[in-house]
Amino acid sequence: MTTNPEKLDTLLSEDRAFAPSEAFKAKANFNDPGIYERAAADPEAYWAEQAQNLTWFEPFTKTLEWNPPHAKWYLNGKLNATYNLVDRHRVGERKNKAAIIWEGEPGDSKVFTYDMLGREVDKAAHMLKSLGVKKGDRVMIYLPMIPELPVAMMACAKIGAIHSVVFAGFSSASLKDRILDADAKLLITADAGWRRGNQVPLKNNADVAVEDTPIEKVLVVERIGKDSGATMQEGRDVFWHDLIKAAPSDPFPAEPMDAEDILYILYTSGTTGKPKGIVHTTGGYLVGANTSMRSVFDLKDDDIFWCSADIGWVTGHTYIVYGPLSAGATLVMYEGAPDFPDRDRFWEIIEKYGVTIFYTAPTSIRTFMKWGPQYVERHNLDSLRLMGTVGEPINPEAWMWYHEHVGHERCPIVDTWWQTETGSAMIAPLPGLVTTKPGSATRAVPGVAVDVVDENGDPVQPGAGGYLVITKPWPSMLRTIWRDDERFQKTYFGKYPSIYLPGDGAHLDEDRYLWILGRIDDVINVSGHRIGTMEVESALVDHKSVAEAAVIGRSHEIKGQAITAFVTLKEGISATDDLVTELKHHVVEKIGAMARPEEILFTAELPKTRSAKIMRRLLRDIAEGRAIGDTTTLADPSVIDMLKQQYSDKE
Ligand code: WT7
C-alpha cells in the first residue's frame, strides 16, 4: 500500500461526528432510512425505479444481465442522452429556466436557458452532421471550459456519436495518443484558452497532435480571436462560428440509442504507460448520474449547483454536464483559476450567483486554508446549503476548515468516493440520512454493494483495513476498456472473479464507516488527478540523457501526493540543475503540466530485486523519511544507504 501507517492513526483517532439537522432532514429528497435496506435486498428493483426519472423512447424489458465481468443494464430500452439533458426540459416550467450560467475567467459571462441551450445544441448537431459525423463515430474534444464544450458533447450525443474529451491541460503528445487509440476523424478545439490571464495555445497543440492521425477535420472555436496566434490550415480547419451561422435552425431529431450504446470514452491512467479508454454507455451511466444528483446532492428545482472541476475529467462529465442537466438543474460553470484576478474568485462566484450546492476537491480546500480565511470572509455565502468534495481522501483538518469557514457550520458535507470507471458517486453520505465524520466518505449509496476484503477476498472485520471492492454490478459502471477488453477483465476483475477491484485501500471502522486510504497500485493522485507512475517514467526515459527512471508519489501537504523521480543518467552525462529543469519540462511536453515532477534526484543506481524489478516501495520510504522496509530481496542492499544519504543531502 502507498499509504503510510501514521496517517491511519490520525484517521482512527477521529471521533467528531455531525448528524443531519432536523430542518435539513425534513426537506431532503432521500429521508427514509429504510431505503438502504430495501435497495440492498433488491438492487435491480431500486435501479429500475430510479431509471423512471429519465425519459425513455422505448421502455427497457429487463433491468440487468450480468455475465461477469460484463454487465448490461436496461435491456432493449431506447433513449437519447441529450434529449434527457435538454429537450425534455424545453417544454413546460423549465423552458425559460437558466440551465448554464457560465462565467469566463476575464469576467465575461453568459446565461443559457434550457430553451436557448436546446437551440445551440441542435445547431451544433446539424453542423457536426454536415462535417460527416455519424452514429458511432468518435469525436475528440480538446476545449477549455467554455459553453461550446458541453454543447459539443451534447451535439455528439444527440447524433449518437461517441465523444472523447481530452482535458485542455494535456500536451499535444497525449492528445495524439488518445486520437489514435479512439480512431477519431474529427477534432474540436479552440484557438486558445485563458488560464490566469495567460493564453493556452490549444490550436497549436492540436496542429501537432493531428499529424499522422486519422483526423480529417479540425473544428475551431474562437475563444481569444486574432491575438491567439492560431493559424488555420486550408481544407482541414473550419471555424465553429462560420458553420454554426450556416446551420439550419430547425430542430435536430434525437437519435434513439440503445441503453447499452456507447455514450463516451474518457481516458484515464493505469499501471502501464498506456492510458485506458474507459467506456460508458447511455442508459446506465445516465441513471447513475441522475440518481446521485437527487440522492447525494439532494438537488431541488430551485438549487444553483456548482461543481468546480474541469469537464476534461470525469467529475465534470458527470457533475457539470450529465447529472445536473438531466435533472433540470441550474448549474454554474467557471472557465478559470481560483486565484484570478484574486484569491477570492470562488467565493465571489458563489455570492454573485447565489450558489446553493458547491462541489470541489480537497486539494483546493487545502490551498484555500493556506491562503487564509480572509478571502472567504469578503463574501456573503449564506446561499450555500450543501457542500461536497471529491478526488482524494480529505484530511479531517481540511474537512473542518471547509465546514467552519465556507459552510459556517450549517451545511452538510458529502465526501464522495468514486472513479472515472464508476461513472457516478459510489461511497458518500446521503445528507439527510447519514451522520458524517470528518475524513470518512461514510458508506455506499443505496443500490451499491461495497466491502473491504483481505488478500483472499474475505471481508475484514470492523477495525481492520484491506482492499476496497464493489461486489455487485451497478448501472453507471464502465462496460469495458475501448478496444482492450482483456485489459478490462484483468485490471478490474483479475484478482477476485466477479468482484470489481477499484485499486484503493480502505479501512472499516467500528461503526462500519469507510475510510479511503489511497491507491494500492502504481497510480498516484496529484491534486485529485490520477497519474500513472509508468507514464512519467516513460516520459523521462524518452529523454536522450536518461538511462532509467523510477517515479513515486510522496505525501504532500497541499497536493495530497507529489511526484518524485529517481533518475540514472547515461554514461558521460553530468547531473546538473539545468538538466533537472530540462527533464521537468520534457515531462510537461510529453504528458501535461499536471505530471511535472516536484523533485528529481539523480542517482548512480536504483534499488532492484535480483530479478531486476525496481523496488518503488523502498523509494517511497526514502522520500517520506520513514524507516526502510524489508530489503532482503534487494540485489545490492548498499544502494539504499547511498540513496538515503543523497536524498537527505539534497534537503
Ligand atoms: C481515484 C479515482 C471521480 C472522482 C475524481 C477522480 C481517488 C476519488 C475520493 C474520495 C478518497 C478518492 C481514489 C480513486 N478518490 N474520490 N472522496 N476519497 N479518494 O477520478 O481520476 O478516476 O480517480 O481518486 O483513489 O480510485 P479518477
Image (cartoon, rainbow, N blue to C red):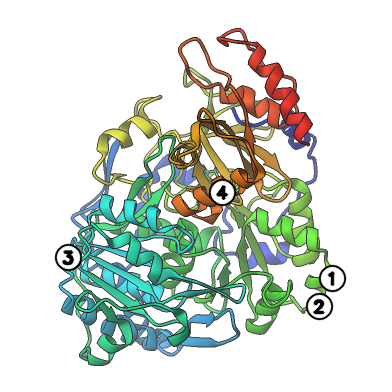
Residue at figure coordinates x 69%, y 49% from the top left: 435
Q: Type of residue at label 1?
A: Gln
Q: Which mark is residue 135?
A: 3
Q: Nearer the viewer, residue 548 or 254?
A: 548
Quadrant where the C terminus is found in the figure:
top right
User: From the viewer's perspective, is the residue at label 1 or at label 4 nearer?
Assistant: 4
Left or right for 59, reference 285: left
Q: Position of residue 611 (x, y in %)?
A: 45, 12
SS type, badge 4 = helix
Q: CA distance from mark 4 to mark 2?
A: 41 Å
Sequence-earlier tag: 3 or 1: 3
**Residue type at numbered disc 4:** Glu
| Residue at left offset 66%, top offset 37% | 554
Query: How far is mark 3 from mark 1, CA to CA?
Result: 51 Å
Q: Which residue is mark 4?
A: 582
- In the picture, the disc for residue 374 is 1
